[in-house]
Image (cartoon, rainbow, N blue to C red):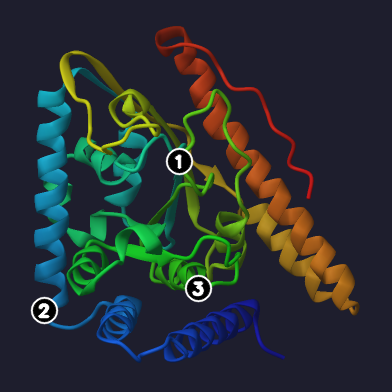
Amino acid sequence: MGSDSDDTHTVASQQYCRTEKLINQLPRNTWQERSYAFWVARQLEANEPWWRPLSAMILGTTSATMSMVLHLGFRRVLIEDLHKLTDILESKRNRAVVTVANHESTMDDPIIWGAMPARMRWQPDFMRWTLGAKELLFKNPAFNAFFALGQTIPTVRGDGIYQLAVEIGLHKLNQNKWVHVFPESKVNQDAQLLRFKWGVSRMVMEAERTPIVIPMFFSGMREVMPLRRRLPLPRLNPFERTFYIRAGDPIDFTEQVDQWRTTRGKMTSLDDAKRLDEQVRIHIACRLWDAVNNLKTESEQKFGSGYSSPSFSS
């Protein structure tokens, strides 16, 4: 009888095969489709000799530029407890890191990573993989190359939690990488956090080793990139704007995930297993929403009104 470790490796192997199958099914009729499929396939392992230097150049240049934007375009840049993330990234760890944050504007990523220490910006292993909207980012062959090398995984809105982007995100977690997710799944400038989608819950549950999850909150971008503008250009103002980012305490879902796996393994009914999966996804999404909202609430004393909790019912 195999060990739990063997079973986990088997699940990870099945996940990898599932991801390869989805990549092989991508259309390749036009030049844009062939380019898109090429770069998505390269992302899976990101092990070509040319990948790392090109990726480091794009990540380093972009984050360094965003650091300049933060310090020249805002009156104040307040960074709190970011060491809770950077200390873990630089530690000798045997599992991945997931960060989740609110989503104020289309410039949230990459500008928030301009706050990362300079020593980390040029090292792809210390920079995030993130899920980004395919229709906005992967629009032509040049963008395909830039965003793929910039460790952005193309996400198709509305395709659900079993789409290719989530599978690639899972594979990156199985490689002990850092994956960042905006669980609201779209820009939200209203006075309330949106319900968190379940893609991040699935990644936490199905990663080979349960990742460390760090909630984050930031503010200041909704004034810079308001949604209802004819020209979607940033309105930076070094005399007025304040940018604030804070990392929360790490959350460890290992106990809940282990219990879910044990309980699910004893089930004989597929319907019961699906119901259990949904319950655990809701639990993780709710807990992550609460963690981000708590950071938001604690910052209200500095930056304004808070968010009330939405319903997480299915």
Quarter holding residue 266: bottom right
Which residue carries the number 2 mark?
Answer: 50
Quarter holding residue 287: top right
Which residue carries the number 1 mark?
Answer: 187
Within 10 Å of the Cα at label 2, are there few (<14), some (14-19), or many (20+) other Cα atoms? few
Within 10 Å of the Cα at label 3, are there few (<14), some (14-19), or many (20+) other Cα atoms? many
Mark 3 to mark 1 CA distance (whole Å): 23 Å
**Three-letter code, disc 1:** Val
Q: Residue at x 52, y 66 (%)?
A: 209
- Badge 1 vs badge 2, beta-carbon distance below 8 Å: no
**Nearer to me, 85 or 78:** 78
Q: Residue at x 60, y 45 (%)?
A: 196
* Disc number for residue 74: none
Q: Is residue 58 left or right of residue 219?
A: left
Residue 141 vs 22, above or below: the answer is above
SS category of the residue bearing label 3:
helix
- Which one is in front in this view, the residue at disc 3 or the one at disc 1? 1
Residue 281 vs 84, above or below: the answer is below
Residue 265 x, y percent position in the rendering: 79, 75
Which residue carries the number 3 mark?
Answer: 167
SS category of the residue bearing label 2:
loop
Residue 60 x, y percent position in the rendering: 12, 53
- Badge 3 vs badge 1, beta-carbon distance below 8 Å: no
- Badge 2 vs badge 3, beta-carbon distance below 8 Å: no
Mark 2 to mark 3 CA distance (whole Å): 24 Å
Total marks shown come to 3
Q: Earlier in the sequence, mark 2 or mark 3?
A: 2
**Three-letter code, disc 2:** Trp
